[in-house]
Image (tube, grey):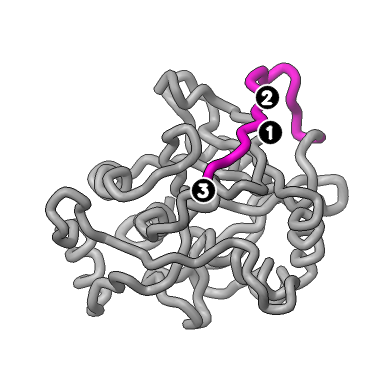
Amino acid sequence: MARKTLSVAGIVLVIVLLGGFYGCNDRSSRTSSEWNEQSIKTGDLLFQDIDCGPLCDAIERVTQSIRGVHFSHVGIAQWQNNSLYVLEASQGSVHYTPFKKFLNRSVDSLGKPKVAVARLDSVQQQLMVNALQYAPDFLGKPYDDFFLPDNGRYYCSELVYVLLEKENNNQQVFVLEPMTYKDPQTGEIFPVWADYFARLKMEVPEGLPGLNPGGMSRMPHLHFLHWYWQPDQN
Protein backbone atom coordinates (compact mmCIF):
# COMPACT_ATOMS: atom_id res chain seq x y z
CA MET A 1 0.00 0.00 0.00
CA ALA A 2 1.17 3.51 -0.68
CA ARG A 3 1.98 6.20 1.91
CA LYS A 4 3.03 3.72 4.59
CA THR A 5 3.98 6.44 7.06
CA LEU A 6 0.48 7.83 7.32
CA SER A 7 -2.09 6.21 5.06
CA VAL A 8 -1.53 2.55 5.92
CA ALA A 9 -1.27 3.55 9.53
CA GLY A 10 -4.30 5.73 9.04
CA ILE A 11 -6.43 2.88 7.74
CA VAL A 12 -5.74 0.82 10.82
CA LEU A 13 -5.41 3.57 13.40
CA VAL A 14 -9.08 4.35 13.19
CA ILE A 15 -9.80 1.29 15.28
CA VAL A 16 -8.23 2.96 18.30
CA LEU A 17 -11.32 5.12 18.51
CA LEU A 18 -13.25 3.73 21.44
CA GLY A 19 -16.64 2.99 19.93
CA GLY A 20 -19.68 1.68 21.77
CA PHE A 21 -19.47 -2.00 22.52
CA TYR A 22 -22.85 -3.59 21.79
CA GLY A 23 -24.12 -7.16 21.69
CA CYS A 24 -24.46 -8.34 18.11
CA ASN A 25 -26.53 -11.03 16.43
CA ASP A 26 -23.96 -12.98 14.42
CA ARG A 27 -25.94 -14.69 11.66
CA SER A 28 -22.90 -16.06 9.89
CA SER A 29 -22.56 -18.36 6.93
CA ARG A 30 -19.39 -20.37 7.45
CA THR A 31 -19.24 -22.26 4.14
CA SER A 32 -17.52 -20.45 1.29
CA SER A 33 -19.07 -22.76 -1.30
CA GLU A 34 -22.51 -21.45 -0.30
CA TRP A 35 -21.55 -17.82 -0.78
CA ASN A 36 -20.64 -15.85 -3.86
CA GLU A 37 -20.30 -12.28 -5.00
CA GLN A 38 -23.93 -12.15 -6.15
CA SER A 39 -25.05 -12.68 -2.54
CA ILE A 40 -23.72 -9.26 -1.60
CA LYS A 41 -26.20 -6.39 -1.88
CA THR A 42 -25.64 -2.68 -2.36
CA GLY A 43 -25.39 -1.14 1.11
CA ASP A 44 -23.78 -4.16 2.77
CA LEU A 45 -20.82 -3.31 5.00
CA LEU A 46 -17.54 -5.11 4.40
CA PHE A 47 -15.38 -5.34 7.51
CA GLN A 48 -11.69 -6.07 7.08
CA ASP A 49 -8.89 -7.16 9.41
CA ILE A 50 -5.60 -5.58 8.32
CA ASP A 51 -2.31 -6.41 10.07
CA CYS A 52 0.29 -3.67 10.53
CA GLY A 53 2.81 -4.81 13.15
CA PRO A 54 3.36 -2.66 16.27
CA LEU A 55 0.54 -0.27 15.39
CA CYS A 56 -1.98 -3.09 15.34
CA ASP A 57 -0.53 -4.56 18.53
CA ALA A 58 -1.43 -1.29 20.26
CA ILE A 59 -4.83 -1.21 18.59
CA GLU A 60 -5.70 -4.66 19.90
CA ARG A 61 -5.09 -3.52 23.46
CA VAL A 62 -7.89 -0.95 23.39
CA THR A 63 -10.57 -2.31 21.05
CA GLN A 64 -13.14 -5.05 20.84
CA SER A 65 -14.98 -6.42 17.80
CA ILE A 66 -17.54 -9.14 17.31
CA ARG A 67 -16.06 -12.60 17.96
CA GLY A 68 -12.87 -10.96 19.20
CA VAL A 69 -11.77 -10.02 15.67
CA HIS A 70 -9.76 -6.81 15.45
CA PHE A 71 -11.42 -5.11 12.49
CA SER A 72 -9.35 -2.21 11.26
CA HIS A 73 -11.29 -1.16 8.17
CA VAL A 74 -14.81 -0.99 6.76
CA GLY A 75 -16.24 -0.15 3.33
CA ILE A 76 -19.65 -0.08 1.66
CA ALA A 77 -20.61 -2.49 -1.13
CA GLN A 78 -22.20 -0.99 -4.24
CA TRP A 79 -23.20 -2.55 -7.53
CA GLN A 80 -22.54 -0.41 -10.61
CA ASN A 81 -23.21 -1.64 -14.16
CA ASN A 82 -23.25 -5.28 -13.03
CA SER A 83 -19.88 -4.92 -11.30
CA LEU A 84 -19.33 -4.85 -7.55
CA TYR A 85 -17.28 -2.05 -5.97
CA VAL A 86 -16.46 -0.93 -2.45
CA LEU A 87 -16.80 2.71 -1.45
CA GLU A 88 -14.07 3.37 1.11
CA ALA A 89 -11.86 5.95 2.71
CA SER A 90 -8.32 4.62 2.54
CA GLN A 91 -4.93 5.11 0.91
CA GLY A 92 -5.21 8.86 0.88
CA SER A 93 -8.76 9.54 -0.26
CA VAL A 94 -12.39 8.47 -0.59
CA HIS A 95 -12.73 6.28 -3.67
CA TYR A 96 -14.21 3.14 -5.17
CA THR A 97 -12.22 -0.10 -5.18
CA PRO A 98 -13.12 -3.17 -7.26
CA PHE A 99 -14.53 -5.80 -4.92
CA LYS A 100 -12.01 -8.53 -5.75
CA LYS A 101 -9.12 -6.13 -5.14
CA PHE A 102 -10.62 -5.17 -1.79
CA LEU A 103 -11.28 -8.82 -0.93
CA ASN A 104 -7.73 -9.98 -1.54
CA ARG A 105 -5.97 -7.02 0.07
CA SER A 106 -5.70 -8.80 3.41
CA VAL A 107 -5.39 -12.58 3.66
CA ASP A 108 -4.71 -15.04 6.45
CA SER A 109 -2.04 -17.74 6.59
CA LEU A 110 -4.22 -19.97 4.42
CA GLY A 111 -4.70 -17.31 1.76
CA LYS A 112 -8.30 -16.56 2.78
CA PRO A 113 -9.41 -12.89 2.67
CA LYS A 114 -9.91 -11.52 6.17
CA VAL A 115 -13.20 -9.88 5.24
CA ALA A 116 -16.69 -10.30 6.72
CA VAL A 117 -19.99 -9.25 5.14
CA ALA A 118 -22.62 -7.58 7.34
CA ARG A 119 -26.09 -6.18 6.67
CA LEU A 120 -28.16 -3.73 8.68
CA ASP A 121 -31.78 -4.33 9.62
CA SER A 122 -34.20 -3.44 6.83
CA VAL A 123 -34.88 0.20 7.81
CA GLN A 124 -31.22 1.07 8.38
CA GLN A 125 -30.16 -0.93 5.32
CA GLN A 126 -32.46 1.13 3.12
CA LEU A 127 -30.98 4.28 4.64
CA MET A 128 -27.53 3.00 3.69
CA VAL A 129 -28.64 2.26 0.13
CA ASN A 130 -30.25 5.68 -0.22
CA ALA A 131 -27.23 7.40 1.34
CA LEU A 132 -25.02 6.21 -1.50
CA GLN A 133 -26.61 8.88 -3.69
CA TYR A 134 -24.30 11.30 -1.85
CA ALA A 135 -21.17 9.29 -2.64
CA PRO A 136 -20.14 11.54 -5.57
CA ASP A 137 -19.96 14.47 -3.14
CA PHE A 138 -17.28 12.63 -1.14
CA LEU A 139 -15.18 11.07 -3.88
CA GLY A 140 -11.65 12.47 -3.84
CA LYS A 141 -11.98 13.93 -0.35
CA PRO A 142 -8.73 13.41 1.58
CA TYR A 143 -8.29 10.62 4.09
CA ASP A 144 -8.45 11.84 7.68
CA ASP A 145 -5.02 11.00 9.07
CA PHE A 146 -5.84 13.29 12.01
CA PHE A 147 -9.07 11.53 13.11
CA LEU A 148 -10.78 14.82 13.84
CA PRO A 149 -14.51 15.47 13.37
CA ASP A 150 -15.83 17.98 10.85
CA ASN A 151 -12.51 18.76 9.18
CA GLY A 152 -13.45 17.94 5.58
CA ARG A 153 -11.47 14.70 5.76
CA TYR A 154 -12.82 11.18 6.31
CA TYR A 155 -11.55 7.93 7.77
CA CYS A 156 -13.26 4.65 6.92
CA SER A 157 -15.95 4.35 9.60
CA GLU A 158 -16.45 8.13 9.67
CA LEU A 159 -17.47 7.97 6.00
CA VAL A 160 -20.14 5.35 6.79
CA TYR A 161 -21.34 7.40 9.75
CA VAL A 162 -21.58 10.68 7.84
CA LEU A 163 -23.40 9.17 4.85
CA LEU A 164 -26.01 7.55 7.09
CA GLU A 165 -26.45 10.67 9.19
CA LYS A 166 -26.93 12.76 6.06
CA GLU A 167 -29.67 10.47 4.76
CA ASN A 168 -31.29 10.17 8.21
CA ASN A 169 -32.04 13.90 8.65
CA ASN A 170 -28.84 14.44 10.66
CA GLN A 171 -29.83 11.79 13.20
CA GLN A 172 -27.24 9.21 14.28
CA VAL A 173 -27.52 5.61 13.15
CA PHE A 174 -24.13 4.58 14.54
CA VAL A 175 -23.22 6.17 17.87
CA LEU A 176 -20.16 8.35 18.42
CA GLU A 177 -18.10 7.67 21.54
CA PRO A 178 -14.99 9.23 23.08
CA MET A 179 -11.89 7.91 21.36
CA THR A 180 -8.84 6.75 23.25
CA TYR A 181 -5.20 6.06 22.50
CA LYS A 182 -4.27 5.01 26.03
CA ASP A 183 -2.93 1.71 27.27
CA PRO A 184 -5.79 0.38 29.44
CA GLN A 185 -3.30 -1.13 31.88
CA THR A 186 -1.20 1.97 32.52
CA GLY A 187 -3.55 4.78 31.54
CA GLU A 188 -0.73 6.32 29.50
CA ILE A 189 -0.79 7.19 25.79
CA PHE A 190 0.80 4.40 23.76
CA PRO A 191 4.23 5.59 22.52
CA VAL A 192 3.35 4.52 18.97
CA TRP A 193 0.39 6.93 18.98
CA ALA A 194 2.42 9.72 20.55
CA ASP A 195 5.01 9.33 17.79
CA TYR A 196 2.35 9.18 15.10
CA PHE A 197 0.66 12.41 16.10
CA ALA A 198 3.99 14.10 16.78
CA ARG A 199 4.84 13.51 13.12
CA LEU A 200 1.59 15.26 12.28
CA LYS A 201 2.57 18.10 14.63
CA MET A 202 -0.57 17.81 16.71
CA GLU A 203 -1.64 16.68 20.14
CA VAL A 204 -3.10 13.21 20.59
CA PRO A 205 -6.89 13.70 20.13
CA GLU A 206 -7.75 11.80 23.29
CA GLY A 207 -11.41 11.93 24.25
CA LEU A 208 -12.76 13.48 21.06
CA PRO A 209 -15.87 11.85 19.58
CA GLY A 210 -15.40 9.17 16.96
CA LEU A 211 -16.13 5.58 16.05
CA ASN A 212 -14.29 2.55 14.77
CA PRO A 213 -15.01 -0.62 12.79
CA GLY A 214 -14.80 -2.73 15.94
CA GLY A 215 -17.50 -0.79 17.76
CA MET A 216 -19.63 -0.71 14.62
CA SER A 217 -19.40 -4.49 14.27
CA ARG A 218 -21.13 -4.95 17.64
CA MET A 219 -24.20 -2.91 16.84
CA PRO A 220 -27.42 -4.86 17.64
CA HIS A 221 -29.11 -4.16 14.31
CA LEU A 222 -26.09 -5.23 12.26
CA HIS A 223 -25.97 -8.90 11.25
CA PHE A 224 -22.96 -10.75 9.90
CA LEU A 225 -23.85 -12.94 6.94
CA HIS A 226 -20.54 -14.40 5.86
CA TRP A 227 -16.90 -14.70 6.92
CA TYR A 228 -14.38 -15.34 4.15
CA TRP A 229 -11.94 -16.78 6.67
CA GLN A 230 -12.06 -18.56 10.02
CA PRO A 231 -10.91 -15.88 12.52
CA ASP A 232 -10.82 -18.34 15.43
CA GLN A 233 -8.19 -20.39 13.57
CA ASN A 234 -5.69 -17.54 13.13
Q: Secondary structure at mark 2?
A: loop
Residue flagged by tag 3: what amino acid is it?
A: Tyr
Q: Are marks 3 and 1 in contact (CB under 8 Å)?
A: no
**Mark whose residue sits in front, 3 or 1:** 3
> Within 10 Å of the Cα at label 3, are there few (<14), some (14-19), or many (20+) other Cα atoms?
some
**Nearest to the observer: residue 164 or residue 54:** 164
Question: How far apart are labels 1 and 2 at the CA level?
Answer: 6 Å
Q: Residue at x 75, y 34 (%)?
A: 37
**Nearest to the observer: residue 113 or residue 67:** 67
Left or right for 129, reference 201: right
Question: How far apart are labels 3 and 1 at the CA level?
Answer: 18 Å
Q: Are marks 1 and 2 in contact (CB under 8 Å)?
A: yes
**Image quadrant where residue 192 sits:** bottom left
Left or right for 73, reference 140: left
Label 3 vs 2, first from the N-terminus: 3
Q: Is 15 in the magenta?
A: no
Tally the marks.
3
Question: How far apart are labels 3 and 2 at the CA level?
Answer: 21 Å
Label 1 vs 2, first from the N-terminus: 2
Residue 48, visible in the rendered structure: yes
Mark 3 — residue?
A: 22
Residue 139, visible in the rendered structure: no
Q: Are marks 3 and 2 in contact (CB under 8 Å)?
A: no
Q: Position of residue 18 (x, y in %)?
A: 38, 58
Mark drawn on residue 225: 1
Residue flagged by tag 1: what amino acid is it?
A: Leu
Q: Main secondary structure of the magenta part?
A: loop
